[in-house]
Image (cartoon, rainbow, N blue to C red):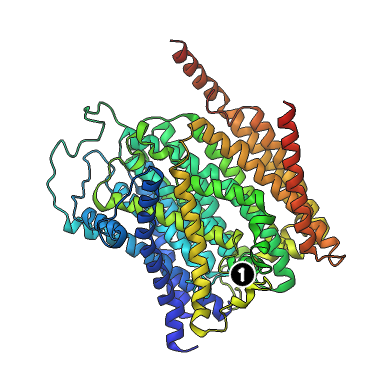
Amino acid sequence: MEPNESIAWVALGVAGALALIIASALPFISSLLGPRRPSDVKLQSYECGITPEQEAMGPVSVRFGVTAMLFLLFDIEVVFLYPWAAAFGRMGLFAVFEALVFLAILAVGYLWVWKRGAFEWDK
Amino acid sequence: MSVGSLIAFCILALVAIFGAFRMLTSHHPVHSALYLVLNFCATAGIYLLLTAPFIAIVQIAVYAGAIMVLFLFIMMYLNLGFTRDILDDKRRRWVTLVAAVLLGALIWMGAALHGAVTLPANALPPPYKVEEIGMVLFGTYALPFEVASILLLVAMMGAVVIARPQLRAESDTKKEAAQR
Amino acid sequence: MGFWEGLWRMALAPLVVLMVVLTTVPLWIWLERRVCARIQQRIGPNRVGVMGLLQPMADAAKLIFKEDITPAHVDRVVYLLAPIIALVPSMAALAVIPFGDLQAADVNIGVLWILALSSLAVYGVVLAGWASNNKWSMMGGIRSAAQMVSYELGMSLAIIAVLLTTSVYAASHGGHALSLRTAVNSQQGVGPLAWNFIWHLPAFVVFIIAAVAESNRAPFDLPEAEQELVAGFHTEYSSFRFAMFYMGEYVHMTTLSAVCTCLFFGGWLSPFAGIPLLARLNVSTVPVLMYLAPLFWFFLKVTLFIFLYIWLRWTLPRMRWDQLMALGWVVLLPAALVWVAVVTVLAGAGKVVDGFVFSGDGWFRLLSLLAVAAAYLIYRRRRGSS
């Protein structure tokens, strides 16, 4: 790597580490400064005053799973588009056309999924 | 490789191994998933050291950001409780260990056959720009790329088809509740 | 490069940037409370410090001395970790933002770094919700995760649309297509007329809506919808861990506003640059102002976006969950997808006819304006007939 670029990557790592340190230090300081007087009622799950009856970590709707799966697939598509967008300025018309074909194939998938009601949460 | 990147590599490799190990030994699937995210992030850092920033970012965005979110949803959906059966069972533990060693040996042999175990000193590829990946992806590898998009299309349909019975059951319960 | 320059570029610049941004958080909180009060015909906090400016500091000092409660049924490690995970990605994302000359890490793939970190931002909220082992938190956390991933797609595609024209600029003027610095440089021209928000209007609108949803703010604040979920994913959090989520929200807003400023609002460029008469106000000849002016314009633009966030929050009612998901998947995603295809065609056409009467960029702008106008007219006509 060019020296300038490696310095930038080091700086990026430093920024990430600093963010982590600051974010971890703040609640730590607070836990030192604050009082600590736990009681049974205080440590209960908050359910507006009613004693909780069952665990909260219960099953959720399968629609969340479908959403996550569709997100994953579209995300892969988007990730493919980033290098294409970066190279767009230097590309010939063939590559531009090719990307349009790529988008069209995905649009077909999108329309199919839409027709099957994957995005309807009120049904 | 400079001293700085050697140190960085050692730290990242240790974090990656730690993450992978704890992923296997954690008591709870959600904890396992989080250790896997740690492992992915450390691996992304190693890609960066290999001057492959695009792969590093994809590793984080797709693996840590999308696939692991999907895993978390599935775990929450299935409400997987505390499981330790694989590692509590002594015989399974040994079988797992032997299988892991055999797999490692297989990978090593495969790499050795292609002479890739010890890299030459100048094996590090020259730094490239993401623009160049785009040029190659949409030039030389145009056809595989379009095939990949068809794969995505099929996966998209599959996702909805698999979830369909569940979705229908859920909307039926909702309708019944509304009628009452 | 000497020792001091190396130290500045590798360690001090990131520190300065993070500190400056953390200092702006109380400022935004103050702005939010004052503007909200004005919108509701109240006065708002005005007692602590001049115009109440020190009120957020007083609140922070209060929160830091409060008891840090860890309820009995939580998943302890994840519960304690979640607020940290909620704050780190949006802070680290700030490292690649060019505030004029000041930039923590001048990497040439800044846009990708933002993409990676915004995909990690989901974790803080979803883990907080799950680890709290509380029904409200659980609902809030899982809603938030679904919401954030859904709107991330529209946002990424909006960014790609801008990258296309940035890439054309980078090919002719040099620079890295994925660097935010290049994105700002490509918007040099006649003041605001050269900024992307005019020529990428659909992408800009998609980005703004997605940004509000990504930071879980009203009208998309379903993860913490008070009336139904108490406080959503942070119901169980107290003391400074609660404040961390609060801070995280504002840092996230700042990050997204800064990205928006770079991509659509000309970053640090002055709105007077390139305008014949006003260009005389150009301060770049005065030594000190030369460094301060870009910073000033950048922060002014970021403040405008923060104000927009606040204005939206206290004006619009909350959306319903199915409407929210439908907006993300059925409106924003296809709109951004279509706009990427349109920009591909128009900018591609611009490259072909480059130099014929206008430059390729000029052609793209002309065609883009025509496309948006045509879409608007078709929409008007269809609405009128039905």
| Residue C305 % position (x, y) | 50, 55
| Residue at x 26%, y 31% (from the top left corner) | A47
- Residue nearest the viewer, comparing C17 with B12: C17
Regarding mark 1 in the picture, which secondary structure is present there? loop
Q: Which residue is mark 1?
A: C272
Q: Which residue reaches farthest bottom?
A: C2
Chain designation of label 1? C
Count of marks, rendered view: 1
Answer above or below: position of C273 versus C39: below
| Residue at x 75%, y 49% (from the top left corner) | C342
| Residue A102 % position (x, y) | 73, 47
Evaluate whether residue B126 shows in this view: no
Judge the density around disc 1: few (<14), some (14-19), many (≥20) Cα neighbours within 10 Å: some
Evaluate whether residue B128 shows in this view: yes
Q: Quadrant of the C terminus of chain C?
A: top right
Which quadrant of the figure has residue C50? Answer: bottom left
- Residue nearest the viewer, comparing B137 with A49: A49
| Residue at x 44%, y 44% (from the top left corner) | C313
| Residue C246 % position (x, y) | 35, 51
| Residue A51 % position (x, y) | 21, 28
**For the residue marked with disc 1, what is the amino acid?**
Phe
Which quadrant of the figure has residue C72? Answer: top left
